[in-house]
Image: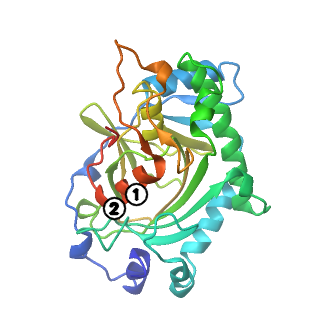
């Protein structure tokens, strides 16, 4: 399977219905309200206070980051526009392979497919030695993420490096997602509702829009803001904080007028790290809410068994 983009391109503008394999009836396209999210500025004197407040109250926020991102988006788009035979060299359903191209999530196991293709890469900080665009961006994400974790640790009343210790030899999963135009957005989903499996997620998106988050019982659009990263908590931080930092349910819409491109960077603990609530945050009044699992086992379970309706699958 070359991917949904190749299929849409092969129709040469004549595609007028959603193929049955991608049929996911929903009313999501009719959501018109927008989420009100804070902006956390890394250069602000109130950065630390604003960050902890955003993590605790919102779970998702905009970050003014100062990282050069235009070339990252350009390179991602060049990959998706490359010939199918070039992309298919990286096609695999093995989730831990260093470079993976795939469509939807795990197509051989899914009854219905999501309307996107993706390219993902696993990186460790010490293994980044190239000076290409992707490597430079990854270095900046590691740097920003570590700075945030120091602040977030203190926000929990812990030593500043306590979360970094729990993350151990942290890994970064970068994932570029391409969502082609869809003839009927009410019959397909770019990505079903889910929470992120890692620790911190940093998302670059173009100006098309399509990201939605759930607050309470309602879904809200996340407005794309130029020059901003969208940042949200992941499941591993929810586990480590014993629920004080919450990963947030979100999904992606498609539309009939424009394709959409995003690049997510998922900063997580070592794949072999045992992740459970930090002992200092567990007490008789606040018992441990989540069982211990390695990040690797957790990722494998999410990819192979829990494709839809994943709402903080951390218990």
Distance Cα–Cα, label 2 vs label 1? 6 Å
Residue 39 visible? The answer is yes
Q: Which is nearer the eye, 33 or 159? A: 159
Q: Which residue is at a point 63% across and 25% down the rendered structure image? A: 151
Q: Is residue 137 left or right of residue 287?
A: right
In this view, 272 is above or below 99: above
Do the residues bearing badges 2 and 1 touch, measured as CB atoms within 8 Å?
Answer: yes
* Mark 1, other Cα within 10 Å: few <14 / some 14–19 / many ≥20: some
* Mark 2, other Cα within 10 Å: few <14 / some 14–19 / many ≥20: some
Disc on res. 304: 2
Q: Which residue is at a point 24% across and 60% down the rendered structure image? A: 186
Disc on res. 106: none
Q: Which residue is at a point 22% across and 62% down the rendered structure image? A: 24
Q: Is residue 283 left or right of residue 266?
A: left
- Percent of width and height locating residue 79: 59, 73
- Percent of width and height locating residue 276: 44, 34
Q: Is residue 261 left or right of residue 42?
A: left
Q: Quadrant of the C terminus?
A: top left
In this view, 276 is above or below 212: above
Residue 234 visible? The answer is no
**Count of residue discs:** 2
Quarter of the rendering containing residue 153: top right
- Percent of width and height locating residue 58: 43, 28
Q: Secondary structure at mark 2?
A: helix
Q: Quadrant of the N terminus?
A: bottom left
Write down the residue under mark 1.
300
């Amino acid at each position: 399977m070359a991917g949904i983009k190749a299929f849409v391109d092969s129709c040469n503008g004549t595609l007028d219905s959603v193929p049955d394999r991608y049929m996911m009836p929903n009313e999501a396209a009719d959501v018109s309200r927008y989420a009100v999210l804070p902006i956390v500025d890394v250069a602000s004197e109130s950065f630390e206070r604003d960050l902890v407040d955003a993590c605790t109250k919102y779970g998702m926020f905009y970050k003014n980051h100062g990282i050069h991102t235009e070339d990252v988006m350009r390179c991602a788009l060049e990959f998706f526009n490359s010939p199918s035979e070039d992309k298919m060299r990286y096609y695999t359903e093995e989730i831990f392979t260093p470079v993976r191209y795939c469509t939807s999530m795990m197509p051989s196991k899914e009854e219905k497919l999501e309307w996107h293709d993706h390219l993902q890469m696993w990186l460790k900080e010490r293994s980044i030695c190239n000076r290409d665009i992707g490597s430079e961006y990854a270095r900046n994400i590691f740097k920003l993420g570590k700075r945030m974790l120091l602040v977030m640790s203190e926000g929990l009343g812990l030593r500043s490096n306590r979360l970094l210790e729990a993350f151990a030899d942290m890994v970064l999963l970068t994932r570029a997602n391409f969502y082609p135009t869809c003839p009927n957005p009410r019959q397909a989903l770019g990505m079903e509702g889910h929470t992120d499996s890692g620790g911190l997620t940093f998302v670059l998106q173009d100006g098309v829009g399509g990201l939605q988050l759930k607050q309470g019982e309602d879904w809200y659009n996340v407005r794309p803001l130029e020059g901003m990263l969208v940042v949200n908590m992941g499941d591993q931080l929810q586990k480590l904080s014993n629920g004080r930092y919450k990963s947030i349910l979100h999904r992606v819409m498609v539309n009939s007028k424009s394709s959409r491109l995003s690049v997510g960077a998922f900063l997580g603990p070592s794949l072999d790290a045992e992740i459970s609530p930090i002992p200092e945050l567990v007490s008789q009044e606040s018992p441990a809410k989540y069982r211990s699992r390695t990040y690797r086992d957790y990722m494998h379970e999410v990819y192979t068994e829990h494709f839809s309706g994943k709402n903080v699958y951390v218990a």
